[in-house]
Image (tube, grey):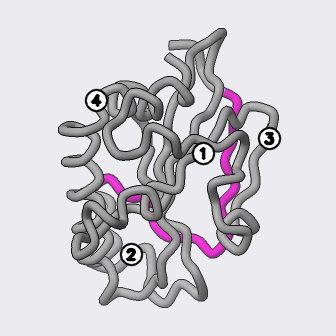
Amino acid sequence: MRFQDTVANSNGVRDCYRAGLQALLERDRNRLSFKDPRKISGSLNLDAAVDGLYRDQPRWDYGIGIKKTGSTDEAIWIEVHPADANQVQKLINKLTWLKNWLNNRAKDLMSITERDSPYIWVSSGHVSFQQTSPQAKRLALAGITFPREYYYLQTRWRKS
């Protein structure tokens, strides 16, 4: 399925698809780069889209669709957030919310969520804890990438 179609099929975000990275705030978009930007099929500002529905809940920021093969896309999920050790539980809570939302409100988006490291933490500033810390281990166990100030994503996919 295409990312655009899965967004259109998802409760609460049907009209929130944007081409390329247009859904991302400029300051956040500037924290990302891609090996082949032509493979970006679209984006979703999930946090803004569902703010009215889940105002007091720990929402995830963005979804990005990446062309895989033919008319098939995969989704990755980006959270831009301060990166210090005391924020780890907040990110885990955001991921729990995201997975619940995907499983209950956006099954098509969940079905195209990339299987290897789809939950990416991009730091909104300096990363102030180490990859060898207990907090980093908690992130890894939760399935969230260790935060980086700038994220480079390879967009060349393996055949599945």
Mark 3 or mark 2, earlier in chain? 3
Task: Verify whether residue 153 appears in magenta.
Answer: yes
Q: Dot 4 corresponds to which residue?
A: 107
Q: Give the mark toward the camera: 3 or 1.
A: 1
Mark 4 or mark 1, earlier in chain? 1
Q: Give the mark toward the camera: 1 or 2.
A: 1
Distance from the alpha carbon under mark 3 to that under mark 1 = 12 Å
Graded by Cα atoms within 10 Å as few (under 14), some (14 to 19) or many (20 or more), the crowding at tag 3 reads some
Q: Dot 2 corresponds to which residue?
A: 132
Distance from the alpha carbon under mark 4 to that under mark 3 = 26 Å
Residue sitting at 62 percent across and 12 percent down?
Answer: 71
Q: Of the residues shown, which amino acid type is indicated by label 3?
A: Pro
Q: Main secondary structure of the magenta part?
A: loop
Span shown in magenta: 143-156
Q: Dot 1 corresponds to which residue?
A: 43
Distance from the alpha carbon under mark 4 to that under mark 1 = 17 Å
Is residue 69 depicted above or below 47 in this figure? above
Mark 1 or mark 2, earlier in chain? 1
Residue sitting at 64 percent across and 60 percent down?
Answer: 24
Q: Position of residue 112 (x, y in %)?
A: 42, 27
Graded by Cα atoms within 10 Å as few (under 14), some (14 to 19) or many (20 or more), the crowding at tag 2 reads few
Is residue 8 depicted above or below 81 in this figure? above
Mark 4 or mark 3, earlier in chain? 3
Q: Give the mark toward the camera: 4 or 2.
A: 4
Is 9 placed left or right of 32 in the picture? left
